[in-house]
């Protein structure tokens, strides 16, 4: 009967091994479930980060639109200033022509002195030539 005792011991050892295997399988399943929940958390974090990236992208797009609008607005101001400058140049050019038409009729026989005949002083007619006949008001 020594065999029988040995057989009982073997069955007891098999039961212990079986219990250990069952326990290890429970741990493997628990680890698998934990891994699944970790994957779900990582997936949620990635989704959340993608929403943030998408929001940043949209913010960048709106910033670009604002810069573009600002640039367009600045170009309108520059164009307006350019138009104003152009109109100022036209005014200066026309004023210059008016001055040239007045000064173009002056005669300078002696440098820096305008040749002129005095007809009146302080709204009074002048008589005489300043040589043989003295100057006098009428």
Image: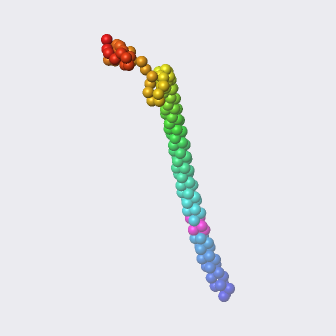
- Residue 116 in the image: state x and y as whole percent: 43, 20
49 relative to 77, above or below: below
On the rendered structure, is 23 left or right of 107?
A: right
Residue 120 in view (yes/no): no
What residue is rendered at 52% in x and 49% in y? 52
Quadrant for residue 22, please give it.
bottom right
Residue 130 picture quarter: top left
The magenta span reads 25-30
The relative height of residue 95 versus residue 7 in the rendered view (above or below) is: above
Q: Position of residue 38 (x, y in %)?
A: 55, 60
Whole-percent x, y for residue 94 in the image: 50, 23
Task: Mark yes or no: residue 21 visible.
Answer: yes
**Who is closer to the viewer here, 134 or 21?**
134
Q: State the count of labels.
A: 0
Q: Quadrant of the N terminus?
A: bottom right
Query: Which residue is rendered at x = 45% and y = 22% of the image?
Result: 115
Give the residue drawn at x 56%, y 57%: 42
Camera-side residue of 122 and 100 = 122
**Does residue 26 show up magenta in the picture?**
yes
Quadrant assignment for the C terminus: top left
Taken as a whole, is the magenta stretch helix, strand or loop?
Answer: helix
**Residue 106, horizontal then vertical, whole percent:** 47, 22
Name, please, the residue furthest toward the bottom.
2
Spot the residue most to the right: 3
Q: Residue at x 47, y 27 (%)?
A: 110
As drawn, 83 above or below 20: above
Q: Is residue 72 magenta?
A: no
Horizontal placement of 2 versus 124: left or right?
Answer: right
């Amino acid at each position: 009967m020594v065999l029988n005792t040995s057989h009982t011991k073997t069955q007891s050892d098999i039961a212990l091994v079986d219990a250990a295997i069952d326990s290890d399988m429970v741990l493997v399943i628990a680890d698998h479930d934990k891994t699944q929940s970790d994957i779900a958390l990582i997936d949620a974090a990635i989704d959340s980060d993608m929403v943030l990236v998408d929001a940043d992208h949209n913010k960048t797009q709106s910033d670009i639109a604002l810069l573009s609008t600002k640039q367009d607005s600045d170009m309108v101001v520059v164009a307006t200033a350019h138009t104003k400058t152009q109109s100022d140049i036209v005014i200066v050019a026309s004023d210059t022509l008016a001055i040239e038409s007045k000064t173009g009729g002056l005669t300078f026989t002696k440098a820096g002195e305008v040749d002129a005949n005095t007809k009146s002083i302080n709204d009074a007619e002048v008589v005489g030539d300043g040589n043989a006949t003295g100057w006098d008001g009428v």
